[in-house]
Image (spheres, rainbow, N blue to C red):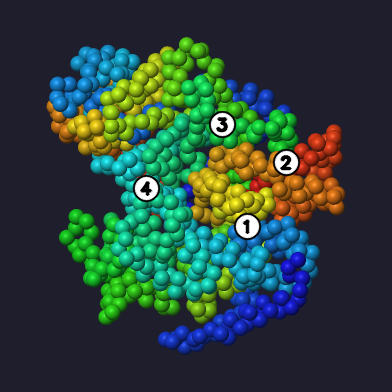
Amino acid sequence: MFLKTPCLMLALVLIDATSVTADEPAAARPEVSRLTTENLARWIDERFATAWQEAKIDPPALIDDATFLKRTSLDLTGSIPSVSQARDFLDYAGEHRRGTLVDRLLNDPRRPEKYAERTAAHWATVWRRMMVPGNSQEARMAVGLEPWLKEQFNANVPYDELARKLVTATNDGQAMMPVNARPRVQGGGPALFFQAIGGKPESAASSVSRVFLGVRIGCAECHNHPFADWKQSDFWGMAAFFSGIKNGAINDAVTATIRPENSTVEYAAAFLGGEPARIGKGRTPRETLADWMVAPENSLFAATAVNRVWQHLLGRGMTDSVDDLDKASPAERKILDDLAKLFVDAKFDLRWLIAGICKSQLYQRECIVLDDTDAEPPPGLRPIKTLSPEQVFNSLEQALSLPVARADGSARFNGLRDQLISRMNEAASNNPDEFRAGIPQALLLMNGRLTTEATDLDQSRTLRGVLDAPFLDTEAKLTTLYLATLSRPPRAEEKKFLLEHIRKQADGDKQKQAYAEIFWGLLNSPEFVLEK
Amino acid sequence: MSRTDFTRRDFIKLSLASAFGVSYSGWLPRLAQAAEAAGVKHKAVILLWMTGGPTQTDTFDLKVGHPNGGPSKAIETAVSGIQISENLPGVAAQMKDLAIIRSLTTAEGDHDRATRLMLTGHRPGQEGINYPSLGSLFAKELGDATNDLPPYVSVSSFRFGDAGGPGFLGPNYAPLVVSGDSRDPEARANLSIENLKAPPGVSKESMEKRFEISKFLQDDFANRAKGPSTKAHKANFDRAMRMIATNAKGAFKLDEETAALRDKYGRSQFGQGCLLARRLVERGAAFVEVTLDGWDTHGDNFNAVKGLCATLDPAWSTLMTDLRERGLLESTLIVWMGEFGRTPKINNNAGRDHFPAAWSTVLGGGGVKGGQVIGDTGKAGTEVTNRPVKIADLYATMCASIGVNPDTENISPEGRPIPLADRSGKIIEEITAVPEKRKKA
């Protein structure tokens, strides 16, 4: 029933407008006005229209409302929409419905949907995965960062501030959490980042450069970078900022110098590129690093952030190697830097960036068709995306109408969520455009307990809701199953095939089973785990 | 992320390889037929993983006559001059095909870290690289991507910590985990794959209908959304379905074996797991791990070890005989190891504690020159006195003995080439021939 009242939309437009005027100008720089999110969308579309024209690319068609709803729900809140949300959105014909939906998913804190909170939680997961990728024990420890990250996203803390908090975090000298500790139990502050990447100056240098600056200097630990211009001195100059980090105790050193093990050379803190760092009075080495890192002049910082948001929303970064901007082509780098500059002008406002991208036509286009070859897709066009393990669970929870409260035996608390996510994690890629799941993951979705209960006529909340509704005829029942899983009504061919499947059953019981079979098929279909 | 993953391309190859497709109607019988045990000889590795850290002093490196030796008695083996524990008479009879390394020396004494060291060849947490496990490495080198069975199967795996995964190699090389049902009345040996069976209450007919609907939805989606991810999803779904349809090529039908043979392996989960390992290797698995837990004998070591050996000895020795009789021993490397050894000095609880400085591991079958002992730990067993063997040496030797070049590299997502065995590793030449290439390097 949302999105039906025009005054609500008006209010949202106003929220956007007020937030623009309410911005305080930064003390040190001249005030720059920022684009509205609609204008940002237009800017993106114009830039890519030119690029496509030059490359003689005919962009794919715009998507329909159902695809838009599923796409934005997954990208922003980390889950497919509910049946009623889908019905409401698809029934509504207001002209600005797409933009309004985006604003609402990002900003609306009201119950019962609590979109803003869910979006903050999803982006906390996205950011945690990006900061500590993979499925090692250390990476799993980083899950403990999510509550803190969620708070930051929920308050829309500017990205430069967020990064500064992470880079300068301390844990008051506490020893490292054992790697097999269950971080789920104890959410950690931002210092957990350094612990989860290994709690050493070397790992801090390498991860901070990769995460925030899109620079891979890890191999310069032992030798100069084979392809890019990074020297061993760049690596150890960065590591020196973190020389206070020892055995997982995250602190600042008095002197920002470091001597590699088995070496006689001592390196002093220096910024990437070689400029020696002067640690100001009363400043810690890491504060000094953060000052340099988030400064608007440091184009790597904003460009890396923009590229990561772009990757999550569109499946690939503007330049594909989100961790290594050295690999970007000059053309890729140009558009990335230009967008990064707008992001800086918008005071590193992540919601602004996300809204602007989602409102663009570019975001609202069909996926491109890729052949078997490893041909690079043209810039700005999206490949099919694979859902993250958390998105799969959230979507299952939504589709199966699972209880969420602990007292109701929610899968969030009884171990089923953890089991599913940890199994899916074994086969999760860091690249959203890559599907990697293996046999155990497929078997889990086919025969695991969640699916089994969901397709059991006595236990399944969704199936019972559909089958017991006296006001739904066969076709409406089928449509409801589609809305619950794929967030769209069935297409004509699907209807024909599946209705026949239901109607040809011998008796009522078999017919009921047929709905369960269809529901199973939908949950195991590629469209459920892939985002078009 | 850098683009070094090859799994997607593998998946595409896979979908082409199975281009004959899978018929969804009447899929059960047809697939079962297609999946008859192929019987083609290929190279494989079986890892007997001794969870907890097995005592060398009471198994393969006895110190009879020294206080550290305790009550353990030695017996002669099939090779004169080599003695092992009296608790392992069956293994002693196989000595001609086994090489004991008594001088392994490592530096991790914590279960978790040591397990990761032994199962990846690298100390954990180094340079943030998520190293692939031994099983995944060999699965990649020796496995056949078109086989219905995944190349790496882990039977009743219990290890300390979380090791044994594919690391950066990705899910194609992740272990298929087989667990035993502890409620099984028949000596806890009811080994099966998680979620392989259709849920109770779902008939075969209903399963077939589900797959028919799936097939329709998949084809429909593929028409509307072409791309590598769609293909990868389908290839994987088909593989999982074939696993269900063929019941994993029938590998788990242990009752096809004679009761006498099953008895010889021992009706323990480990014993039946070893039998399953043979059946999996016959059906094309590249790496099978079977674990035996209980070696963390801080107290009452001698009784505990006696009990463990009563399980280990018949299973391991029958596995050797069985493989030999089927002509599979020379193409199958068998590795016996745990995460570390145990202190030669006996503690106040008649137990032994963690000891990585000087301990034993055993290699057999494959290209291993059996009937010999490598290294020495002196009279007291407290240190390596001759021929120290490091983890990289062991990895290089395992690779070479099954005919894989230890210098073969995998590229980590960080873009680093990681050789199967660290370059510092030297092949133990007494155990297996050093390839020409390696000699030059």
Classify 10 Å Cα crowding around label 1: few (below 14), some (14-19), many (20 and above).
many
Q: Determine the CA span between mark 2 and mark 1.
A: 26 Å
Residue B47 percent coordinates (x, y): 39, 29
Point out the frontmost of discs 3 and 2: 2
Residue B107 visible from this viewpoint: yes
| Between discs 2 and 1, the one toward the N terminus | 1
Say whether residue A142 is left or right of residue B378: right
Residue B83 percent coordinates (x, y): 22, 18
Circles 1 and 4: CB atoms closer than 8 Å: no
Residue bearing the label numbered 4: B417
Q: Residue at x 60, y 52 (%)?
A: A407
Residue bearing the label numbered 2: A458
The vertical placement of B413 against B269, above or below, is below
Dots 4 and 2 on the same chain: no
Question: Which secondary structure, mark 1?
Answer: loop
The vertical placement of B206 against A4, above or below, is above
Classify 10 Å Cα crowding around label 4: few (below 14), some (14-19), many (20 and above).
few
Residue bearing the label numbered 1: A79
Dots 3 and 2 on the same chain: no
| Towards the viewer: B131 or B39 | B131
Dots 2 and 1 on the same chain: yes
Question: Which secondary structure, mark 4?
Answer: strand
Point out the frontmost of discs 1 and 4: 1
